Image (spheres, grey):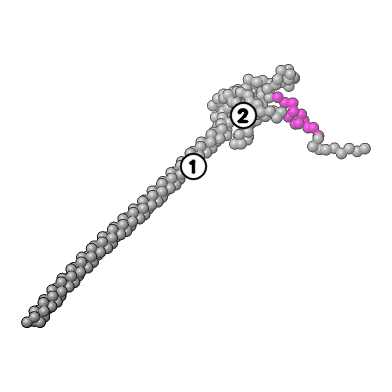
Amino acid sequence: MNSEIDPNKVVTDYDLLKRNYQFIPDSKNADTEYQKKLFRDYALVDLRHYDKGKLGVRWRVRNDVLNSKGERVCGNVHCQNCFNLKTYEVNFEYKEQETKKNALIKVTLCKPCSQKLKFYHQQKRKRREEKKQLNLQQSQQILTQKLLIDNLIKSDKKKQKKKKKSKRKHKKSKEKEKEKEKRRRKKKRKKDKKKKRKEEFEKAKLQFKEKKVSSRKRKNYEQQTKHEDEN
Ligand SMILES: [Zn+2]
């Protein structure tokens, strides 16, 4: 039976290395032939992807120590500069067997290489500062807008209150006017009634007077005719 070989299942040297390699070996792996050949005083770095914040690190081997690589020659594996060297202690963060680890390593670099080493973190810090500044500006903008809206609402409320007050005042004054008018009419009615009563009284008085006069006249006339008859 021919079993097909799945290329994904082929185990390469790189797979083995990935599975077993330890940058800082535990006690089980510390005494292996490979680990014994490493010098862990200084580390060498690969800075080709410095702009992405990626750093390749390895320990020195015998040849490096003999050539003073990473000690009197720049510790960047692609640089042979021997001047203006400075030793840095760097916190190296890495992932090994799906586990995040970090180690403090000592690395000697020339000035241009040290700038490359710091580049990513400096950019990151710069971006963080810019973001912080932007956030601050945005929050200030939001605050200003909020204040503006609050003021608008306040002034609108004030206006409405004023309008209501004036409306109330107007209504009150109208009611007062109405009341006044009512009182005036009542007074007039009273006055008219009084006047009418007075007029009626005067008329009655006059009528009575006229009646009195006519009755006296009649009496006089009767007396006169009586007197004439007697004569
Ligand atoms: Zn260098």
Instruction: Residue type at mark 2: give it.
Output: Asn
Secondary structure, magenta segment, majority class: helix
Q: CA distance from mark 1 to mark 2?
A: 42 Å
Point 89% across, 37% down: residue: 3
Q: Quadrant of the N terminus?
A: top right
Q: Is residue 199 visible?
A: no
- Spot the residue most to the right: 1
Q: Tell me where residue 142 appears, x and y as whole percent.
A: 47, 43
| Residue 117 image-quadrant placement | top right
Q: Is residue 68 above or below residue 223?
A: above
| Residue 100 image-quadrant placement | top right
Point 57% across, 25% down: residue: 88
- Local SS, label 2: loop
Question: Which numbered disc flags the more N-terminal residue, 1 or 2?
Answer: 2
Disc 1 Cβ-to-ligand 1 distance below 8 Å: no
Neighbour tally class for label 1: few under 14, some 14-19, many 20 plus, Cα within 10 Å: few
Q: Is residue 125 visible?
A: yes
Q: Tell me where residue 208 appears, x and y as whole percent.
A: 18, 70
Residue indicated by mark 2:
76
Q: Is residue 35 left or right of residue 108?
A: right
Instruction: Nearest to the eye among marks 1 and 2: give it.
Output: 1
Assess whether residue 228 is covered by the magenta stretch: no
Q: Is residue 184 above or below residue 11?
A: below
Point 57% across, 34% down: residue: 120
Q: Quadrant of ligand 1?
A: top right
Neighbour tally class for label 2: few under 14, some 14-19, many 20 plus, Cα within 10 Å: many
Residue indicated by mark 1:
138
Question: Which stretch is magenta?
Answer: 10-22
Disc 2 Cβ-to-ligand 1 distance below 8 Å: yes
Q: Quadrant of the C terminus?
A: bottom left
